[in-house]
Image (cartoon, grey):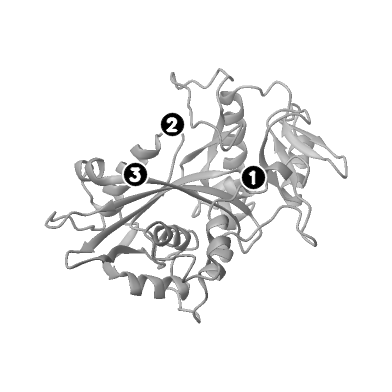
């Protein structure tokens, strides 16, 4: 399958706006309702539900002798939560596993959770999406004292509007004759990928599954996607912060995402060269920054990869207040909060 067709060049802010493209309660948008952890208006909000999901959950209740959902139909402050008694991480995870598998097998929302889209990866859901990334140490999930609330199938995350988490690492080299000149290792996604086939990607990237540490995910993805040895990553990778954005898919599903950013500058003579390993990447190419910028502006990077590279250029002093008229808007948009304060009153 050929890669994406380049579009007329856009500004960095326009590119960023295609990724951070949703605001809760925008005029004319469909009304979404908060997904609460337990049936009380004081409960933490863990997601946002579109009307068609709420309607389906209502049908689920009607066909069950032991409904899993409580639905408040207040036209102004309605919400959906797990039913009373479904009050532990293990119980919530069981409900979500059964529900998502049944929706997959019965053909509901095939654009998201068809067998082809199914990832068989569990994402964590937290009470506070900005809180600690903890996890039950004994693995049974019976207690309910952590920020961790439950886990669910990755491909269904957009249906429930949960905050998801990933890692993105920029692997680059510096011209020994001119330290201001960067070259970045850029992969092309395989044509067989469930999402964004053929698009350019970040050097290393992946979602963080439940129970895995952030840096452990970087190490894992570096080997699986790019054949970069663990010892190289542990010696040279550096955390550089995070970016966050609220993406609405073309179908309208809501994907608030946090990406933890890392840099790995390959030292001269290291002999390390990223290579495909697990079939998710078709090829790697070492590109000068000018070529990377061109590909960003013409829309051939996956939607959430361009912002990571824009952030890289801000941090390296390549994009500055003096050469970029949209500088402050860009920097602010790279670190959004998903209008989270509005989730319980959208």
Q: Residue at x 88, y 44 (%)?
A: 75
Snapshot quadrant of residue 103: top right
Residue that badge 3 annotates? 218
Residue that badge 1 annotates? 160
- 10 Å neighbourhood of mark 1: few (<14), some, or many (≥20)? some
Labels 1 & 3 near each other (Cβ < 8 A): no
Mark toward the start of the polypeptide (1 vs 3): 1
Mark toward the start of the polypeptide (2 vs 1): 1
- 10 Å neighbourhood of mark 3: few (<14), some, or many (≥20)? many
Seen from the viewer's position, the closer of residues 249 and 44 is 44
Element under label 1? Answer: helix
Snapshot quadrant of residue 98: top right
Q: Is residue 62 left or right of residue 166?
A: right
The extreme front residue here reads 322
Counting from the top left corner in percent of width and height, residue 62 is at: 79, 36
Counting from the top left corner in percent of width and height, residue 214 is at: 40, 38
Q: CA distance from mark 3 to mark 2?
A: 14 Å
Counting from the top left corner in percent of width and height, residue 272 is at: 17, 55
Q: Residue at x 53, y 41 (%)?
A: 153
Mark toward the start of the polypeptide (3 vs 2): 2
Snapshot quadrant of residue 92: top right
Residue that badge 2 annotates? 211
Which numbered mark, 1 or 3, is in the foreground of this view?
3
Element under label 2? Answer: loop
Q: CA distance from mark 2 to mark 1?
A: 20 Å
Q: CA distance from mark 1 to mark 3?
A: 26 Å
- 10 Å neighbourhood of mark 2: few (<14), some, or many (≥20)? some
326 over 133 or under it: above or below: below
The circle drawn on residue 5 is none
């Amino acid at each position: 399958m050929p890669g994406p067709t380049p579009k007329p060049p856009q500004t960095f802010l326009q590119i960023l706006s295609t990724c951070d493209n949703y605001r809760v309660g925008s005029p004319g948008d469909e009304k979404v309702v908060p997904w609460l952890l337990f049936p009380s208006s004081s409960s933490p909000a863990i997601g946002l539900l579109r009307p068609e999901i709420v309607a389906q959950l209502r049908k689920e209740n009607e066909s069950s002798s032991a409904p899993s959902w409580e639905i408040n139909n207040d036209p102004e402050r309605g919400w959906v939560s797990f039913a009373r008694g479904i009050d532990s991480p293990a119980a919530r995870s069981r409900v979500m596993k059964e529900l998502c598998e049944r929706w997959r097998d019965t053909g509901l929302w095939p654009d998201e959770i068809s067998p082809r889209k199914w990832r068989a990866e569990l994402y964590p859901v937290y009470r506070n999406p900005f809180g600690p990334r903890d996890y039950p140490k004994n693995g049974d999930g019976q207690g309910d004292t952590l920020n961790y609330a439950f886990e669910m199938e990755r491909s269904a995350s957009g249906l429930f509007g949960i905050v998801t988490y990933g890692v993105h690492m920029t692997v680059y080299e510096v011209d020994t004759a001119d330290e201001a000149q960067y070259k970045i290792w850029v992969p092309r996604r395989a044509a067989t990928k469930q999402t964004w086939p053929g698009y350019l990607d970040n050097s290393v990237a992946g979602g963080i599954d439940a129970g895995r540490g952030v840096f452990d995910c970087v190490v894992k993805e570096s080997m699986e996607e790019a054949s970069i040895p663990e010892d190289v990553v542990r010696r040279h990778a550096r955390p550089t912060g995070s970016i966050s954005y609220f993406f609405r898919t073309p179908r309208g599903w809501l994907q608030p995402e946090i990406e933890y950013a890392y840099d790995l500058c390959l030292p001269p003579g290291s002999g390390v060269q990223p290579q495909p390993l697990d079939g998710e990447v078709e090829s790697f190419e070492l590109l000068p920054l000018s070529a990377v910028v061109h590909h960003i502006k013409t829309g051939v990077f996956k939607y959430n990869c361009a912002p990571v590279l824009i952030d890289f250029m801000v941090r390296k002093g390549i994009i500055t207040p003096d050469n970029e008229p949209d500088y402050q808007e860009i920097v602010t948009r790279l670190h959004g909060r998903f209008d989270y304060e509005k989730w319980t009153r959208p």
